[in-house]
Amino acid sequence: MSNECKLIDEAYAQALEIVRACAVLSGYRASALTAGYPQIWSRDSVVIFIGIAATGDPQLIGAGRAALETMAAHQSRLGLIQLNVNPDTGYISTENAGAVDSNLWYIIGHYLHYHLSGDLDFLRRHWSSLDRALVWLDYQDMNECGLLEIPEAGDWMDLLAVRYNVLYDNVLYYAALLAHEELSRALGEEEKRHRPRVDAAGVHERINLLMWIDRCWVSEHFAEHLDRLKNMRLEWFMLYHNMGTISSRPFYLPWVAFREYGDWCDSLANLLAILTGVADGHRTEHICAT
């Protein structure tokens, strides 16, 4: 075995030990250290769960299931999945409590658990919570353009000034809508499920129209798509394209607001765009070459 393979195996073993130390009856603590974070964080738990799914470790997969239970138990009356919960005290953090992505990861986490376990009873027991989580997300589209509007510090990027139509959240929104739709079919709840005004295909289209800047496409197709863009309430798309304030970019913009936008590559969000299928082959090639 090469030295590189040994290092990878060692890193893998140590990573598992860290996660095992964080796994408790209520899910995954953010830290196993006494001086660390003792809470169950919603977004962190599902991201960990995705990695754990590949191990097949029943104890750690069970902790992922428990984290979903914890999230559901502390869901607000309006449908918000809390940013984090201290499993020892039940205390819900309200400082820096922006948690739009908690709802998104919660739905995706249930999708993952169902595909791992096939447990329809668990899914049925949480279906009302899942549906309310999507209703809450629907209300975050405050101007009904079809994309979520995110306040500053409204997701994991609490130290970065991203706002309004944020790529990271809306890519996850696309994935969550697809997951919710599939889970509803598995339960036979297709007719009763909450349906946002804009479906997953519409979110996919809007992300690619608003956040992928391709001057050649704009020059060729802008006029024919003008009415459709107006109907989507993406007037700011026309604003900055017509003003000529930005040229083509080989990645999705990290956020777009009224007359402002971020002009840097959010690597996590762009990779999520690839993994979820928001980015087609052409865009994927450009992103990976960036």
Image (spheres, rainbow, N blue to C red):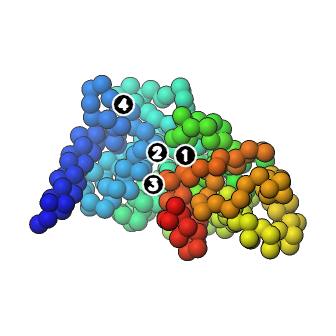
Q: Secondary structure at mark 4?
A: loop
Disc number placed over residue 109 in the picture, else none: 3
Q: Which residue is mark 4?
A: 37
Residue 146: tell me if it is visible: yes
Residue 103: x, y in percent?
Answer: 55, 47
- For the residue pair 52 and 113, the one nearer the viewer reads as 52
- N-terminal of the two: label 2 or label 4? 4
- N-terminal of the two: label 1 or label 2? 2
Residue placed at 25% from the left, 48% from the top?
Answer: 15
Q: Which residue is mark 1?
A: 101
- N-terminal of the two: label 3 or label 1? 1
Disc number placed over residue 43 in the picture, else none: 2
The Cα atoms of the two marked residues, 3 and 4, are separated by 21 Å
Residue 184: tell me if it is visible: no
Residue 252: x, y in percent?
Answer: 61, 58
Q: Secondary structure at mark 3?
A: helix
Residue placed at 73% from the left, 55% from the top?
Answer: 246
Amino acid at the residue labelled 4: Tyr
Residue placed at 86% from the left, 66% from the top?
Answer: 226
The Cα atoms of the two marked residues, 1 and 2, are separated by 7 Å
Mark in the foreground, 3 or 1: 1
